Image: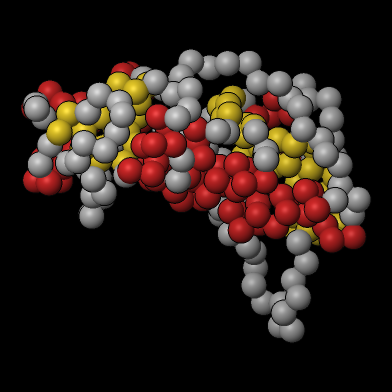
């Protein structure tokens, strides 16, 4: 049975402060929920209009689902999972560093890209959007369950990092003509301002994605689109 306390809890988790307070986050939709059920994440509550999950489920009506869903067209089920405790992340292989990426859709897409290209770690500045934001979770399509994400002082993290630091800039070296390693941190910047000055000073290898259009009028690429190109080139090499 869906109770008033359930509704209050789930709707409160749309705000970061309550996610941090309760150490819980929401996942919606059959596919996303199944991805998390098959991961190391621990289930807290599961509501569904159908008895389709092996986990303990509270069956609810479509009308009740509307009350707890953040989607315009709710997809069968809403689950609440426990936010895992922070763990030590080994700085092996390629790492994506996010310098104040604010858009939930961009972060969700970047997490999904890292899952696709086999990048296991994302290090985020503290001002980067919360990865447990419902829009981020939705955009990852379950990939959040397979990528480790660390929020920290990005500047300090990079200063203590012992391998090459890559960043994308308009005046960087053409990424398509580089021999790229299998280890390093690739910094992607804020949607409006790019990589901040403090982080830029720590970049050891400046890369650019060249424009091929005749007019070359486009100022920049969306950060998630740029990430897909950069990761594709690193993996191709």
Image quarter for residue 192?
Answer: bottom right
Above or below, 68 against 171 in this view is above
**Apparent side of residue 178 relative to residue 199 in the rendered image (left or right):** right
Q: Is residue 201 visible?
A: no
Q: Is residue 185 above or below residue 218?
A: above
Residue 158 visible in the snapshot: yes
Residue at 30% x, 21% y is 44
Could you tell me which residue is drawn at 57 percent across and 33 percent down? 147
Q: Is residue 143 left or right of residue 82?
A: right
In percent of width and height, residue 143 lies at 51, 40
Tell me residue 136's x, y (percent): 43, 43
Q: Is residue 37 left or right of residue 72?
A: right
Q: Residue at x 39, y 36 (%)?
A: 34
Q: Position of residue 225 (x, y in %)?
A: 61, 58
Query: Colour mode?
Result: secondary structure
Q: Residue furthest bottom?
A: 214
Number of numbered callouts drawn:
0
* Residue drawn where x is 45% and y is 46% of the image: 141
Query: Can you say which quadrant of the picture contains the N terminus?
Result: top left
Image vertical order of residue 102 relative to residue 26, above or below: below
> For this rendering, which residue is in front, 9 or 143?
143
Q: Is residue 120 above or below residue 171?
A: above
Spot occupied by residue 204 in the image (x, y as percentages of width and height): 85, 40
């Amino acid at each position: 049975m869906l109770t008033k306390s359930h509704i209050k809890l789930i709707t409160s988790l749309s705000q970061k402060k309550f996610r941090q307070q309760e150490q819980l986050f929401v996942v919606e939709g059959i596919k996303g929920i199944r991805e998390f059920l098959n991961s190391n994440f621990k289930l807290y509550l599961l509501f569904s209009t159908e008895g389709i999950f092996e986990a303990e489920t509270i069956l609810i009506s479509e009308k009740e689902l509307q009350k707890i869903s953040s989607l315009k067209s709710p997809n069968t089920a809403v689950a609440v999972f426990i936010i895992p405790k922070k763990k030590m992340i080994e700085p092996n292989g390629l790492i994506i560093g996010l310098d104040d990426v604010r858009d939930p859709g961009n972060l969700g897409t970047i997490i999904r890209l890292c899952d696709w290209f086999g990048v296991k770690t994302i290090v985020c500045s503290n001002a980067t959007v919360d990865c447990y934001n419902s829009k981020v979770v939705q955009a990852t399509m379950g990939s959040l369950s397979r990528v480790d994400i660390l929020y920290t002082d990005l500047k300090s993290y990079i200063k203590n990092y012992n391998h090459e630091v890559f960043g994308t800039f308009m005046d960087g070296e053409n990424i398509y003509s580089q021999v790229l390693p299998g280890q390093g941190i690739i910094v992607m910047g804020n949607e409006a301002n790019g990589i901040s000055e403090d982080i830029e000073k720590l970049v050891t290898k400046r890369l650019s994605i060249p424009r091929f259009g005749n007019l070359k009028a486009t100022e920049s690429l969306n950060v998630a689109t740029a990430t897909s190109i950069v990761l594709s080139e690193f993996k191709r090499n």
